[in-house]
Structure formats: C-alpha cells, structure tokens
Amino acid sequence: MKYALLVYTDQSSWQALSDVESARQRAEAMPGWNRLFEEIGKADPNVVSRELASASAAQVVRVVDGKTVVTDGPFAETKEVLGGVLVAELPDLDEAIRLAALVPAAEYGTLEIRPLSNR
Amino acid sequence: MEFMALVYDDPSGWDALSQAEQEAGYEMYMAVARDATAAGALVDGGALARTAAATSVRVRNGDALVTDGPYAEVKESLGGYYLFSCDSLEEAIAWAARIPSASHGGAVEVRPIRVDEEIVA
C-alpha cells in the first residue's frame, strides 16, 4: 500500500533564524535526512519526497462563480504547518511508523501518516 | 519549477453525494490528472485516505510516540495532492483552479517546492 508521510513543523522559530544559522542547522540535520532517504529508498526506490517552500509562500486557490480567486495562505491556520511530503509504497503501517520516526523533523514536529486511497 | 497543490475539503460534502455523483466527481479529479499528464505538467498525485485512518508519530527524547488520528482535527482536511511541474506560479494556479474542490466549497493550496541548492550552503 502507498502511504503519505506528512511532515508538520512550527516554522516560526525557523524563520526567526539568520540565513547562516538556518544553513548551519540544515547542514547539521542532513545526515539524519540522508539516513531516512536511504532507508525509505530501500523500501521503495520510487519514493516521492518534496520539501515545500515556507507556508508564507502559499497561495490558496478557490473558484467562485467561475472566477479564480487567489489569496495568501496557508489554508490551515495551525501552529505547525505542512512542510514536506514523502509518498512511498510500503509493506504495512508498522514500516510507515518506523520510517516516520526516522524523519529528523519528528523530533521537533509531527509526522502524520495517511494511506493513499485505493481509487 | 515544481508546485505542490494541496487539496482541502470537507469530506462530509462528498459523503452526501449519490454514488453516481461520486463517480462523476471522481472522474473530474482524474480528468485534471490526465490533462496535466498530457501537458507534461504532472509529476505525481494521489488521494489520501480519510483522517480517521491517520496515524501521528512524534519522537521526543529518543522515544517514538504513536497516536491514532491526524495532526489536527479540522473540518476541511487535506484530501489529496497534485505535484505539478510548471513554468510559473500562474500556470500552477490555473491547474489548481481546475481541481473540483476549488469550486465546491473547498480550496487548493499551491506551494512551490524547495530546491536543494538552498541546502548545500
């Protein structure tokens, strides 16, 4: 079954950092991410993983009376916001949980696991 | 450039549809995927199972805490995604506007994908 691993983090503390400091923290977290990508790549070589631009860059699209209306996002006003998505074919939920716990952001944010719908 | 289109809607609206309406509705989502694929603009996409099927994982002090349920209980939840490859944000917004949820009480959030060169500092 395919599972989506949704990475939710509080981006406000991140955005308060200087460029140098955020680059340093990203570099520090890289071995953890590399380990995750290695493990999830073993489970599914076709894993799709993407990091989203910060929520402040989000645009929300609605169509009202046939007209496209675009507003600044994000859509959900929650403290932790979606910052990344990984989608992989995995044997079961246990494996999805194991991999979710390997995501470095799980140490300070939340990983939500959702099966993909069959149809 | 890649853009993630996050599809938010209230599943109760979908549940209120007849089976024939759901089939027709599903076909509208598939049509966006087919057209975007034909235009070379679709990288990936999928429909997520309901939030009732969600599991949340947090690691604190080295321990994995696993709970049933989504990160946040919200009326309009993330129901699926389309990953588009487009030349501009405007193009991505045009695709997003074709996703049925955008015109049926939900919304589609478009987010650019971060590229790796920012990481390799």
Image (tube, coloured by chain):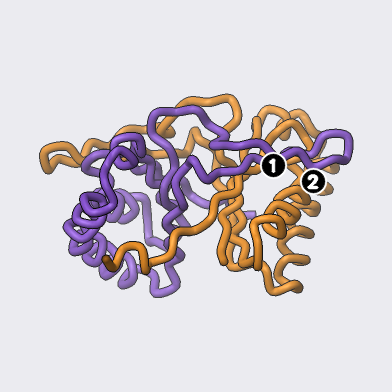
Chain colours: A purple, B orange
For the C terminus of chain B, the image quarter is: bottom left
* For residue A25, side relative to residue A89 (left or right): left
Q: Please, what is the three-letter code of the amino acid marked with disc 1?
A: Val
The local crowd at label 1, few if under 14, some if 14 to 19, many if 20 or more residues have their Cα within 10 Å, is many
* For residue A23, side relative to residue A48 (left or right): left
The residue indicated by pointer 2 is: B25
Chain designation of label 1: A
Name which residue lies at 78% across and 35% down: B104
Disc 1 versus disc 2: nearer the observer: 1
The local crowd at label 2, few if under 14, some if 14 to 19, many if 20 or more residues have their Cα within 10 Å, is some
Chain designation of label 2: B
Q: Nearer the viewer, residue B96 or B22?
A: B96
Name which residue lies at 58% across and 25% down: B75
Residue located farthest toward the left when viewing the structure as drawn: B61
Q: How far across and down, in percent of the image, does residue A8 sit? A: 38, 41
In this rendering, do the residues under marks 1 and 2 share a single chain? no
- Does residue A23 appear in the picture of this structure? yes
The residue indicated by pointer 1 is: A61
| Image quadrant where residue A109 sits | top left
